[in-house]
Amino acid sequence: MKEEKRPEHPAHTHILPDGTVVTHTHHHSHTQTRAVLNRMSRLIGHLESIKRMVEDGRDCSEVLVQLSAVRSAINGVSKIILKDHLEHCVVDAVRDEDKEALDRLNRAIDQFIK
């Protein structure tokens, strides 16, 4: 059986308002990982199907309807990831006074909502 190699989780350091230095790694273990992966697999299959539609010269209206369905599915999986992130990472960041993690979330939200 092939062993799955997981990426290293880089350590980062925070200096708390009282001057305490905290170094830790951030491991993403979420309750919705399997659901997200399943949805992503379905999305990839759906996109492959749309690609075949274009290759086969299917009607543009049909392609657009399918692309709209994919966009809706992407929004759905994004919502799951955001909620899971808030429930786990952001809760940890607030507890650890990790302003950097909260800044990253703000930048990600800005990019996502563009």
Image (cartoon, grey):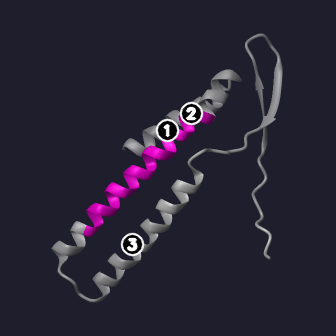
Instruction: Say which residue appears at 75% left-offset and 59% top-offset.
Output: 6
* Label 3 neighbour load within 10 Å: few <14, some 14-19, many 20+: some
Please state the horizontal and vertical placement of residue 38, each as a whole percent of the image. 51, 62
Whether 34 is drawn above or below 3: the answer is above
Q: Are marks 1 and 2 in contact (CB under 8 Å)?
A: yes
Question: Closer to the N terminus: mark 1 or mark 3?
Answer: 3
Q: Magenta includes 1?
A: no
Q: Position of residue 46 (x, y in %)?
A: 38, 72
**Picture quadrant of residue 34:** bottom right
- Looking at marks 2 and 3 on the same chain, the residue that comes earlier in the sequence is marked by 3
Residue at 58% x, 30% y: name it. Answer: 102
| Residue picked out by circle 1 | 83
Give the residue type at disc 2.
Glu
Q: Which residue is mark 3?
A: 47
- Disc 1 residue type (three-letter): Lys
Q: Residue furthest toward the bottom?
A: 56
Horizontal side of 49 relative to 86 (left or right) equals left
Measured in 3D between alpha carbons, the distance from the residue under mark 1 to the one under mark 2, in whole angstroms, is 6 Å
Residue occupied by mark 2: 87
Within 10 Å of the Cα at label 2, are there few (<14), some (14-19), or many (20+) other Cα atoms? few
What is the spatial separation of the Cα atoms under label 2 and label 3, in whole angstroms?
30 Å
Q: Which residues are magenta?
A: 66-88
The picture quadrant where one finds residue 15 is top right
State how far apart marks 1 and 3 are (Cα): 25 Å
On-image quarter of the C terminus: top left
**Residue 67 x, y percent position in the rendering:** 29, 66
Q: Which quarter of the figure has residue 49?
A: bottom left
Camera-nearest residue between 35 and 48: 35
In the rendered image, the quadrant that contains the N terminus is bottom right
Please tell me whether mark 1 or mark 3 is closer to you in this view. Answer: 1
Mark 2 vs mark 3: give the one in front.
2
Residue at 26 percent of width and 61 percent of height: 68
